[in-house]
């Protein structure tokens, strides 16, 4: 959408050629034309100018966010200021691009837009296993009262934890079953996990509440670590540190300030003290798209999480095709209740 | 971009586990180095641009990061902003010397004069 018909005609020809007739490009010279088109055609991507009469690109993005929250959006403008960039990205634009001045520039934009169009979440849910990370996953499944199978494995052991309607009903690890298997899996120092669709297990071996099971797992883990330390070996978690020191457990009295757990589509499953839920969902979707892009540009494998270190607090954004999580933790010593971070 | 910055970035070629690193100055000038053939140097401009945008997005959501860590199954990207607006990005394999040295690299980055 652009109020300059010459620019629209030029970009339509150029992109149609580069898109090898796979792209279907529809043009509009105003927001109302664009909205009418969106009513009658399903679009994969909307590309908008910013400076337009009547309704500018930022207001248009705001409307699109309400009427078509899942639609991918990009902005191309001749007047790219930081202020406009921030406003557009905050309104859900995935890309903010300066209008090109050469055919090479147009080609670069085409590549970026094609990348945005073809971006799709990977199937499955994969992450790097740490003690906290695994407990968090179980906690979010239970809080969301969902049903799933959490498969966990490393070089030594493979096992499964069955969660039905938010209750842990069965665990199996090697020859072990029940709570023994559950505690063994949660005490693993490293490995990987995947969430699978729920299937009823052949037996049900666990009945306790998930909160107590997680607490008991933490106690068992601490005892194992202490025994290992007494025997001269380093505790398992310290023996295989995955992340750098800045991600180590905080040495202050950490407090959860905000939690949002939602489905892959952004539907809330659990919300606690989240000041602006739609904005957080937009942020998580933005994180997912950038992570996907980084994964394409570098050999990094599947995305696990974004850790945001803030002044006096930190936040974690974890995204997957069927679940997105945002948690912010602050220090009670450093917390400033009047200044949300 | 002065020689001190370039020397520090190129020194990373000898650190095991370092995939690449890049610097983005407040005027949007980018300097990227790749130490892994699967991630060509040209990608770094794009990566730095996207990381800078991520900072802007987070700031727009009331989250002004002191550091960002993007964790993947086979690597991490660290982004360290400096008060003058310069950004240092480092990509490493997990559990490597490079990953363990990010804090040190960040300290050196902060010790450089603004604009360096």
Image (spheres, coloured by chain):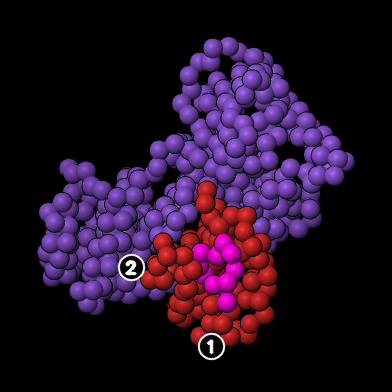
Q: Nearer the viewer, mark 1 or mark 2?
A: 1
Q: How crowded is mark 2: few (under 14 residues within 10 Å), some or many (20 or more)?
A: some
Residue, disc 1 = B2
**B66 versus A134 height, above or below:** below
Residue B13 shows up from this direction: yes
Q: In which quarter of the image is the C terminus of chain B?
A: bottom right
Left or right: A167, with A57 as reference point: right
Q: In this structure image, what is the colour of chain B? A: red
The magenta segment is B11-21
Please state the horizontal and vertical placement of residue B2, each as a whole percent of the image. Answer: 53, 88
> Are there few (<14), some (14-19), or many (20+) residues within 10 Å of tag 1?
few
Which chain is represented by purple in the image? A
Residue at the spot of label 2: A97
Which is nearer the eye, A158 or A107? Answer: A158
Q: Position of residue A85 (x, y in %)?
A: 40, 67
Q: Residue at x 58, y 30 (%)?
A: A158
């Amino acid at each position: 959408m652009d109020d300059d018909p010459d620019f629209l005609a030029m970009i339509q020809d150029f992109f149609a050629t580069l898109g090898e007739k796979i792209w279907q490009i529809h043009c509009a010279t105003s927001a109302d034309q664009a909205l009418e088109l969106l009513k009658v055609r399903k679009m994969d991507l909307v590309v908008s100018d910013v400076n337009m009469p009547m309704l500018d690109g930022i207001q248009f993005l705001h409307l699109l966010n309400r009427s078509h929250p899942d639609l991918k959006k990009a902005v191309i403008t001749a007047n790219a200021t930081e202020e406009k960039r921030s406003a557009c990205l905050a309104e859900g634009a995935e890309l903010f691009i300066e209008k090109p001045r050469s055919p090479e520039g147009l080609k670069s934009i085409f590549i970026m837009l094609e990348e945005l169009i073809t971006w799709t979440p990977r199937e499955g849910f994969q992450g790097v296993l740490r003690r906290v990370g695994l407990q968090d996953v179980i906690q979010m499944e239970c809080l969301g009262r969902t049903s799933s199978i959490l498969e966990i494995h490393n070089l030594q052991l493979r096992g499964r934890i069955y969660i039905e309607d938010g209750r842990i009903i069965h665990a199996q690890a090697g020859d072990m079953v029940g709570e023994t298997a559950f505690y063994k899996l949660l005490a693993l120092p490293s490995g990987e996990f995947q969430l699978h669709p729920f299937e009823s297990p052949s037996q049900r071996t666990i009945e306790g509440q998930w909160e107590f099971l997680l607490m008991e797992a933490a106690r068992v883990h601490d005892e194992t670590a202490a025994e290992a330390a007494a025997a001269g070996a380093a505790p398992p978690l310290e023996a295989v540190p995955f992340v750098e020191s800045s991600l180590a457990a905080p040495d202050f009295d950490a407090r959860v300030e905000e939690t949002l757990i939602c489905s892959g589509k952004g539907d809330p499953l659990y919300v606690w003290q989240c000041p602006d839920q739609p904005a957080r969902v937009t942020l998580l979707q933005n994180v997912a798209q950038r992570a996907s892009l980084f994964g394409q540009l570098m050999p990094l494998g599947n995305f696990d999480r974004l850790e945001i270190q803030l002044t006096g607090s930190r936040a974690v954004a974890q995204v997957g095709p069927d679940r997105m999580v945002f948690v912010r933790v602050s220090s009670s010593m450093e917390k400033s209740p009047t200044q949300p971070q | 971009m002065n020689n001190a910055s370039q020397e520090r970035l190129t020194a990373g070629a000898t650190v095991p586990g370092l995939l690449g690193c890049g610097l983005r100055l407040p005027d949007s000038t980018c300097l990227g180095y790749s130490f892994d053939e699967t991630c060509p140097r040209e990608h770094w401009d794009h990566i730095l641009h996207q990381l800078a945008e991520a900072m802007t997005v987070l700031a727009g959501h009331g989250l002004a990061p002191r550091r960002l860590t993007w964790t993947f199954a086979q690597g991490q990207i660290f982004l360290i902003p400096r008060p003058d607006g310069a950004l240092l990005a480092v990509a490493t394999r997990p559990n490597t010397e490079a990953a363990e040295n990010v804090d040190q690299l960040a300290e050196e980055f902060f010790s450089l004069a603004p604009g360096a």
